[in-house]
Amino acid sequence: MKPEDIMRLKELLPTSLGSAEIREQIARDILRRSVLSARMEYARYLADVRDVAVQLLEGTLDQASARNTLEGVLERMGHSMDDEGGLKNPASIRRLDLILETQTQMAASVARLQGQTPAVVEEWPAWELERVEDRALPRPDWAARWNLAGQSVGWEGALPTHIGGRMVALKSSPIWQALGDGVGGFRDTLGNPFPPFAYSSGMGWSDISRRECIELGLEPDGKPAAAGSLAPSEDEIDEVARRFGFGDFGEGL
Amino acid sequence: MELYISARISPKLRGLLMEEPADYRKELFSVGANALASGLQRYLRREAGRRHVTANRLGARPTGLIRKGAARITAHASASDAIVSVPIVGIARAFHDLTIKPRAAKALTIPIAAAAYGHRVRELVRMGWTVFRPQGRDFLMGRKRNGDGEAVALYSLRKSVVVRQDRTLLPSDDQVSATITNAMARHHARKVVSAA
């Protein structure tokens, strides 16, 4: 499935909760399948976020134009258009970039996981976590996060950074979930076993070939990659079919 | 927008694909597609570092358009084909010139100052700029509100812009074909050796 289709599948989750409360009170799988933004109760706005995220993933819209569309919506909703308040202001440039980047990175990761057939995992059994996007202020603690996550899972299918200084693990390793859970007390994570592992992170995956994997001392285990399914219900499937514009065909045979 | 590129594969591999059952064709295509997706990511990350000409000239921070797009490349395969999605606006420039025209506005706003780079006019106003068009001129100027600096030229106004083809934006057809073919051939060889 293409990332833009995965984005279309997502449900809208208006909420009055802040980001810490969302993390504590809403199940991880619901968050994974939803378009939401802290303290944003307007479903109409979230639908527009979903629409522009789809266009970003299709490569038909650039980030500045996507923000421009959402700024117009927020202005009509009566939000202050001063670029103040940082992440607390839904209309701030930083917050708009955050929601768009998080949603598109997540959809792309799920699409990538769905493409991990047994043959693909056989040829590229591991991922390396590395910087794939620049950030003005990159987090300096990725090695610490990696080592704490690795220790918590007994380094199952993963290499500590003191071996080669790289962050490499089998696609099946539980380290990816531990990293996404913020093991070690990191509160900025999203609870997913795939990038982005933390809000506004520019760290992502690169494939590691079977040969390089073995050279690094990681023995491929033949297990599938960590799950990235959106697991929608049947009702959700019907709703998405309508959203795709297939219409209601009535009762069949 | 979707672009379709036919990758050349060796006659021997084509013959193999014709003979094999659909499941195995899909398996091979998934390997070929993943090889291309991974290779494109590496290629585009390298290229992105060389392509900050406008941002560097203006002294602005790059928007990261190519690196963001590279991070969102995905691949999927069926028994008949493989699709690698490269979600980067303007990536078709690798194959032909692009003529850009305004969708709704009267003119394109081409940034000519660091402050304007990566931002629409609306955003600049939100960031505390007063933006105006000098009478009869084809550019926009601005002054930071609450600032004591002079007005500066921010955007050039154009009816359309032609962006010339740049084939190096993506790897060559030969590189694409070799990446796919090598990965599929290697996977098939592994299967043959494993079965022996």
Image (cartoon, coloured by chain):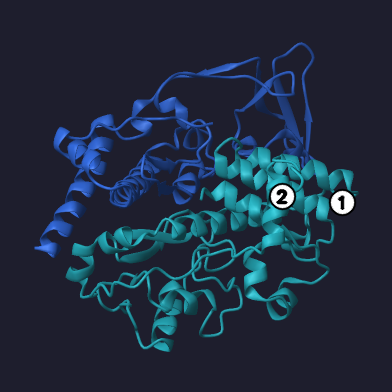
Q: Quadrant of residue A103?
A: bottom right
Q: Residue furthest top?
A: B136
- Tell me which amino acid carries mark 1: His
Q: From the image, tell me which residue sits under label 2.
A: A49
Q: Is residue B28 depicted above or below A143 in this figure?
A: above
Image quadrant where one finds the C terminus of chain B: bottom left
For mark 1, what is the residue?
A79
Q: Residues within 10 Å of mark 1 (few under 14, many from 20)?
A: some
Q: Give the chain letter at badge 1.
A: A
Q: Is residue A114 visible?
A: yes
Secondary structure at badge 1 equals: loop
Residue B81 against residue A30 in the figure, above or below: above
Q: Residue at x 24, y 75 (%)?
A: A218
Residue for point 50% across, 68% down: A139
Image side of residue B8 versus residue A30, left or right: left
> Foreground: B128 or A231?
A231
Horizontal and vertical percent position of residue A42: 84, 56
Q: Residue at x 64, y 54 (%)?
A: A9
Three-letter amino acid code at disc 2? Val
Crowd around label 2: few <14 · some 14–19 · many ≥20 (10 Å):
many
In the picture, one chain is blue; tell me its letter. B
